[in-house]
Amino acid sequence: MRFVPGQRWISDTEPELGLGTVLSVEGNRVTLLFIAAEERRIYAQGNSPLTRVRFAVADTVESVDGWRIQVSSVVEKEGLLEYRGRDEDGIERTLEELDISHFLQFNKPQDRLFTGQIDDAKLYALRYATLLHQGRIDRSPVRGLVGPRTSLIPHQLYIAHEVATRHAPRVLLADEVGLGKTIEAGLILHHQLLTGRIRRVLVVVPEPLLHQWLVEMMRRFNLRFSLVDEDAWEEEPNANPFLEHDLVLCALGAFMREPQRQRQALAAPWDTMVVDEAHHLEWSSAHASPEYVFVEQLSRAIPSVLLLTATPEQLGKAAHFARLRLLDPDRFHDYEQFLQEEKLYEPLAHLIDHLLGEQPLSPEVLGQLKDLAAQDKAEELLSRLNDAEDGPAARERLLRLLLDRHGTGRILFRNTRAAVHGFPERVLHAYPVACPSDFAAAAATTGEARLHPETAVPRIDGEIWWRRDPRVERLAEILKTLKGQKVLVICAADKTALELEEALRVRTGLGTVVFHAGMSIIARDRAAAWFADADQGAQVLVCSEIGSEGRNFQFAHHMVLFDLPYNPDLLEQRIGRLDRIGQRENIQIHVLYLEDTAQSVLFQWYRDGLDAFSRPCPAALAVLQQLAPQLDEQLQKADPAGMQRLLEQARQLTEKILRDLHEGRDRLLELNSCRLNDAKRLVSAIDEFEQEHGVWDYLEQVFDGYGVNVEEHSDDCYILTPGENMLIPHFPELLDDGVTVTLNRDIALAREDMLFLTWEHPMVSGAADLILTSGHGNATVSMLYHPNLEDGQLLLEAVFLLECSAPKQLQIGRFLPQTLVRTLIDGNLRDVAAEIPFDSLHDSGQPIDRVHAAALVRSQQKVLARMLQTAEKVAQKQAPALVAEAGKEMLDTLGAELKRLNALKKVNPAVRAEEIEQLRQTIIDSHGYIQSAQLRLDAVRVVLTV
Ligand SMILES: Nc1ncnc2c1ncn2[C@@H]1O[C@H](COP(=O)(O)OP(=O)(O)OP(=O)(O)O)[C@@H](O)[C@H]1O
């Protein structure tokens, strides 16, 4: 290597710098200027990672001024090259090497090979492995569901898969409290973002849940949301913060305080909106709340909408209907009709139960099924229902068909504890205490205060209420017996929470902390975190109603209800803080109440009328709506006989409503919200995907190739640190002082400080992108051994990709993933790829250094160029069959889906016309893009056999 000022060289490790020019040579040091990148680099002459740029006859070269010549001869004068040839107008020109364009990059494999930029053979193997994995991930039916740091819970995966694979889904996720709606929404977003179906997401949540959402999205899904809050508006009052980020979290309250912010959100383009705790969107035929009106405006403008609520009917059936209307105004336009439709669900649910049973179906049931499936051309299925052998499969298919065609299943998902199973029990502990005389007046008012009288009693001689309230004394005793265990105390009013916490601190000396609506969000999050701290945190968290929504406190299993809410859904929300996924103990519910007051009436109502402490009671709200006048009367002034009558009525009504629900709507909902066999198949598919193609084997290859240090930490866990000689300055997601990673889902769930490395983790996808978008490993020379090849032969392996550059949201990868076409051309210009697979070529153990490799390529350039031409022809011949196969698969899959949607639409108006149109357009577009797929040479390897 002799460096002369004015020569052009290229950096092997940083080809993106473009062409460098030798500025000076002093002693052992050579200085290069990379004008395109405005970088100056100094190298040691002996072992610099540099390659001289030397074009050959017939190459086309571009000048700094933009004109090009095709080289006809090369002359060297005093160490500098001069190229002669004709330009595009046929005029003879001379181009000195100093005047070659600074922006030239040699990323194409053939360019890199012939300019002597030969990669390490390890990087070539890594590139090949990356291409294979990439294709496999693209094709996988569980794409998007593998990466999240979540347990594989069947009902959640079922919903996520069902919803995320739809175009612009608009659904209400209404699982019972604590069953994982946030997780389901996260899975759907993760899937759709990863597959490119969506890019911009707005999540609207109640203020207190902002931080929890932010953390949950990051730690479980690697999704970095930006919080738009008061600070954002204060910092830049005139800017629209919604235009700055793609993933945005914002509190509903923030919009309601300043209408200008609503306009800003409406002015920004979004692909998906998520609204958590959507029961806050109040609506009645007489009055729509401002929150409802605002979300309605957004939902008209945003294609995909996910509403989340555990208590869809908390504000009545009409409000529930109104929220469904947000999702699909065409389908839900008439409330009366909606109520009528619900009545039809019962007979359908009955028929479905017959199908699920194992008894032979009677002629009567068969007749009803025939009528119902009349539109579906299902005669063949119907004829096999009682078959000994084929019957079960036919029943399963007919079941799917019917569930698909009827009900609200496509728009509403609701899983219940009863259906999901495996939840702990709830154990009630009641603590009646005598009502002090000075509380009696407050407890007997007609207003809210009768349910929490401490808010209305005056100070006596300056003495605060809690010094006279026997509930506090009792509570202090309970807490002392629970010493060392976390206890969540909930009451209705902020002021009560604040004062009660003080009382408990004074009386018990235990570590207590308070959480109420008057605190800033940061203070609230801090309080929750202190309570969550297992070792040093507070034992008792006293919170007002604000703590009963959305928060995760399942690390505790004792809860004290200092009062009871009037609305049974709120009671369920409170219990749901502990009764959530992840709860391992039975839940101990301690209820305090003042005897012979409205509090004791309400307690009996819940315990003996609705049985609402021992399990969620989906009938409770409907029962309250019907019996509210009688209940109010008892709350006002209880009489024992009237109370017994009321409880009996409540019991009967609860039973009836539960029965109706079970037989009708809820039965359909349950079956539609999780088809257990499908869900289990998804779980197994994810397990298989993880086990079959261990990500670690691949990553070890990556880390080795790029110079990342790996140290064992413990089983399935490793510490990664940047190595001293990294191939690139920054490896994706690797911090300067290193990261600890795990490959084990269970460990990842327990140790959130570790990265959970899966095929979908940004470190893995970032590394794959890095490999494939750079030239790394795309040109190499190797000495290999194969039993059927004599030594001393020269072969050329060329790897092509059949690529289709289509918009990401079409997800063409499902049908035509990056498809690899491998050719191996021998000295007789024959393709021997089929006889000699990639894995059968073994490393000879004799590495070949770059200088010798480059010399070999130069000396064999003509032969290799001919081999490459042959390889291209061979690959081109294979392309049409691959394109045809992909086209057929696309038509089969999407065509069947279109047929299904069309059939569905006839009987189930929950299918939107727009969805059908979109699918039709997707088929047309996909067809066009698949036909235009092109082959591209991705990597070459010169093989010398030994
Ligand atoms: N698949 C899962 N893996 C691990 N943890 C989970 C999973 N699903 C849910 N959880 C945990 O269970 C708790 C409840 O989940 P989530 O908050 O999503 O429920 P929710 O239905 O939204 O609750 P709420 O009705 O209170 O809003 C959370 O702590 C969540 O992190």
Image (tube, rainbow, N blue to C red):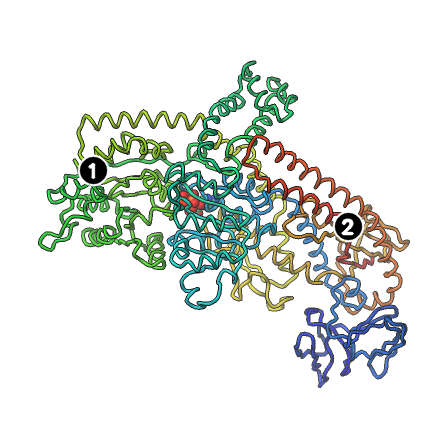
Mark 1, ligand 1, within 8 Å: the answer is no
Evaluate whether residue 540 shows in this view: no
Closer to the camera in the image, 62 or 756:
62
Q: Quadrant of residue 610?
A: top left
Closer to the camera in the image, 297 or 494:
297
In the rendered view, does 791 fall on the left or right side of 162?
A: right
Q: Position of residue 685 (x, y in %)?
A: 59, 40
Furthest toward the front, the residue is 286
In the rendered view, does 95 fall on the left or right side of 440?
A: right
Please give the name of the residue rendered at 38% of the width and 58% of the height, measured from the top-left corner.
Answer: 257
**Residue designated by label 1:** 598
- Mark 2, other Cα within 10 Å: few <14 / some 14–19 / many ≥20: many
Residue 310 vertical placement versus 61 (above, below): above
Mark with earlier residue (2, 1): 1
Closer to the camera in the image, 451 or 572:
451
Please give the name of the residue rendered at 32% of the width and 54% of the height, measured from the top-left corner.
Answer: 537
**Residue designated by label 2:** 821
